[in-house]
């Protein structure tokens, strides 16, 4: 009996979610156990493929991001292997999160830019699209994420912002309240795909952590890395500042998984033992 049971176990595909319930903006760790020598493991949810990496002969991991605007409800998370063909799925319930509205006053150019500034903003957007598009195959986040600055985070993620009386996109990052000049540590390793000044985010570093996961660190007073550099978790990439569309010095950390805008604090909560 035991031999039969373990043979069945060895042939089956299992999908484990760190939690069956997640909030808008959460990061959900997924573990897939596959038959030995299975190839082509993929994870699917929300009509999107989430890239997985192999830990050992039978274990794969992926992160699924719940975009801050994902509609609450119950969805299927599925895993499949190409050979030998097998699939499994688990339900994931997304619950609504209450986002604040904040009203800010900034220089008028940041709200209703002139045509010259619009050209710059358009060029920045094209640069960002290209920077986010090329993610490497190596998951530099497999050991988790660390806090980039010691200062506390406020509850700014997902906030609906009204700038000078006009609604703008939701705030897709978390703000850490650290003073100008505070060193910023890479929350995970990876390749620097942006290290330059952009109109809204000021001096900006984007780290491609691999498999579609990336961090934007914004409003820096100083950039200490260059595009094309590779960094390890914890390396200093620059200093906190107040460049771009801000009302004071802080670090804005925005984390993306594929196209999902997720809360970095949710990724920090994974750090201990998402395996
Ligand atoms: Zn921010």
Image (cartoon, grey):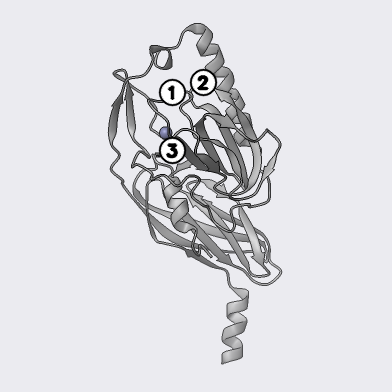
Image spot of residue 176 (x, y percent): 41, 40
Q: Residues within 10 Å of mark 1 (few under 14, many from 20)?
A: some
Q: Quadrant of the C terminus?
A: bottom right
Q: Quadrant of the N terminus?
A: bottom right
Of the numbered discs in the image, which one, if any, rests on residue 245? 1
Evaluate whether residue 259 shows in this view. Answer: no
Most foreground residue, 141 or 226: 226
Image spot of residue 22 (x, y percent): 38, 54
Q: Is residue 180 above or below residue 37?
A: above
Give the residue displayed 51% in from the left and 42% down from the top: 256
Residue at the disc numbered 3 = 173
Label 3 SS: loop
Q: Quick one: label 2 or label 1, which is nearer the N terminus?
A: 2
Q: Is residue 113 above or below residue 54?
A: above
Label 2 SS: loop
Q: Quick one: label 3 or label 2, which is nearer the N terminus?
A: 3
Image spot of residue 153 (x, y percent): 38, 44
* Disc 1 to disc 3, C-alpha distance: 14 Å
Label 1 SS: loop
Residue at the disc numbered 2 = 199
Instruction: Examine the image and state in which quarter residue 84 appears.
Output: bottom right
Evaluate whether residue 273 shows in this view. Answer: yes
Give the residue displayed 68% in from the left and 33% down from the top: 227
* Disc 3 to disc 2, C-alpha distance: 17 Å
Task: Answer whether labels 2 and 1 touch (C-beta < 8 Å).
Answer: yes
Ligand 1 sits in quadrant: top left
Is the CB of mark 1 within 8 Å of ligand 1?
A: no
* Disc 2 to disc 1, C-alpha distance: 8 Å
Instruction: Examine the image and state in which quarter residue 203 appears.
Output: top right
Q: How many marks?
A: 3
Is the CB of mark 3 within 8 Å of ligand 1?
A: yes
């Amino acid at each position: 009996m035991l031999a039969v049971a373990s043979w069945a176990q060895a042939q089956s595909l299992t999908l484990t979610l760190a939690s069956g319930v997640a909030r808008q903006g959460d990061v959900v760790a997924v573990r897939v156990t596959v038959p030995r020598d299975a190839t082509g493991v993929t994870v699917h949810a929300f009509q999107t493929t989430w890239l997985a990496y192999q830990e050992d002969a039978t274990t794969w991991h992926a992160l699924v991001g719940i975009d801050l605007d994902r509609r609450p409800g119950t969805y299927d998370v599925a895993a499949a292997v190409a050979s030998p063909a097998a699939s499994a799925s688990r339900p994931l319930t997304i619950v609504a999160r209450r986002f604040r509205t904040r009203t800010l006053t900034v220089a008028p150019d940041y709200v209703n830019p002139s045509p010259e500034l619009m050209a710059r903003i358009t060029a920045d957007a094209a640069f960002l699209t290209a920077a986010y598009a090329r993610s490497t195959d190596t998951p530099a986040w497999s050991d988790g994420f660390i806090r980039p600055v010691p200062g506390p985070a406020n509850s700014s993620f997902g906030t609906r912002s009204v700038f000078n009386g006009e609604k703008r996109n939701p705030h897709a990052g978390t703000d850490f309240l650290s003073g100008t000049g505070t060193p910023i540590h890479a929350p995970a390793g990876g390749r620097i795909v942006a290290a330059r000044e952009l109109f809204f985010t000021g001096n900006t570093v984007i780290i491609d952590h691999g498999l579609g996961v990336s961090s934007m660190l914004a409003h820096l007073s100083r950039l200490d890395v260059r595009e094309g550099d590779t960094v390890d978790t914890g390396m200093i990439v620059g200093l906190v500042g107040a460049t771009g569309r801000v009302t004071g010095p802080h670090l804005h950390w925005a984390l993306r998984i594929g196209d999902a805008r997720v809360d970095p604090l949710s990724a920090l909560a994974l750090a201990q033992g998402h395996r």
